[in-house]
Structure formats: C-alpha cells, structure tokens
Image (cartoon, grey):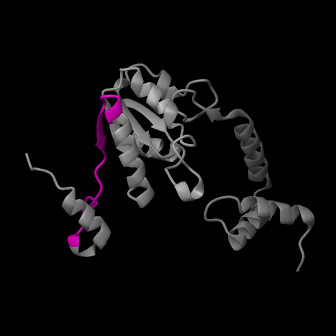
Amino acid sequence: MSYSPLLVRLIDGLRCMPGVGQKSAQRIAFHLLERDREGAGGLSVALAEAVAGIGHCSRCRMFTENELCSICTASGRDSTQLCVVESPADVMALEDATGFRGLYFVMMGHLSPLDGIGPDELGLSKLAEWLGDGEVKELIIATNATVEGDATAHYLADLASRHDVTASRIAHGVPLGGELEYVDSGTLSHAFYGRRIVD
C-alpha cells in the first residue's frame, strides 16, 4: 500500500532517531495523527525552536541557548576539577547520580579514526587551552568502557600530563548489587584488574 507523500515524509523523518526503524516510525506517526494531533503540533514547534535556538556552550560544548551554559555560569562549582564526557546525556547522568560539583567538557563523541573522528572533531584543542590556563588540577575522564572510549581515555590522560594536570578515570566494573556469577567476562576482567586497596 502506498501512503500519501506527507505521511511518507513524516515516517522517514521519524526514522532519524536512534533505535527507530520503519515499523516504529510508522507506529509513532499513526499515533500522533490518530490520537494526539495537539501533542504532534507541540512537538513540531518545540523541535523547530530547539533546532534553531540551541547551540553549544563556548567553554564546555554542552547544549545551551546562551554563550555559556548554566553549569559554566553557576557559582559554587569547583573549577579545579574538570570531567570529560562523550555526550550531553553523560553530563545529565552524572549530575543526577553524583554530587560532582566541578565543571565538564563535552567531546560530542570519541576518537574513531576509521570514522574520521580525531582530536579536532572532538574539540580537544579547546580542552588543551583550558588545561593550559593552569586552573584545572584534576581531569576526570568519564569515557565509555569501549575500545574507542579506552583509546580516548589514553589520549586525554596524555594531554593532561603534558599540562601537569592529574588525570583520573571513573571506575568500571561490577555493578552495585551485582553477583559475580552473572557478570559478563569482559566486565569482570575489567573490575578485577582495576581493583584497589581497601582502606
């Protein structure tokens, strides 16, 4: 069956979202048109305004409508601690789950030479300038526990050492409440070799 051109465009547009394939996009489109046209209109306006009005913080690269984001302009943040993350979602996860009161630098990805993503694409020259200012004392590396995340972490640790900044990396391993027999071997190995002295 062939759909109207507008419906086809809507379904194709929805497929740009991660994890949304043809069937999911079709289901979302039908739901919006059948049951929630008001919600669809609000979504359309919010999306258009966000695309037009949201850019990147000139300091940390987080999403914001202003020159500097609310974290960079907040008083009481510890400017000697800088946490490097791969995405804005990581910032939100750390803000929600930890009491971290330092600042962030958002790379918008990780090193991936095969995909043409190098230090320039991640804004690491801007990070190097920040580290060169001398205010940052600890660079907290919060990259994902993937091959690319590990390679990026090594690059960042080297960058920090060139600026006499202490580099640390968030721990990876057995989740809280996890039982060893059910943890996958990669995670268990990482946790075992990343062990630390018990105080």
| Chain part drawn in magenta | 161-180
- Measured along the vertical axis of the image, is residue 127 above or below residue 156? above
Which image quadrant is residue 75 in?
top left
Which image quadrant is residue 67 in?
top right
The residue lying at 25 percent from left, 66 percent from top is 189
**Residue 139 visible:** yes
Where residue 175 appears, x then y in whole percent? 28, 60
**Residue 100 visible:** no
Magenta stretch mostly in which secondary structure? loop
150 relative position to 21: left or right: left
Q: Looking at the image, which residue sits at the far bottom?
A: 1
In this view, the residue in front, 2 or 197, is 197
Q: Is residue 175 magenta?
A: yes
In this view, the residue in front, 25 or 111, is 111
The residue lying at 40 percent from left, 24 percent from top is 132
Quadrant in the picture for the C terminus:
top left
100 relative position to 106: left or right: left
The residue lying at 77 percent from left, 47 percent from top is 44
- Measured along the vertical axis of the image, is residue 155 above or below residue 195? above
Where residue 114 appears, x then y in whole percent? 55, 59
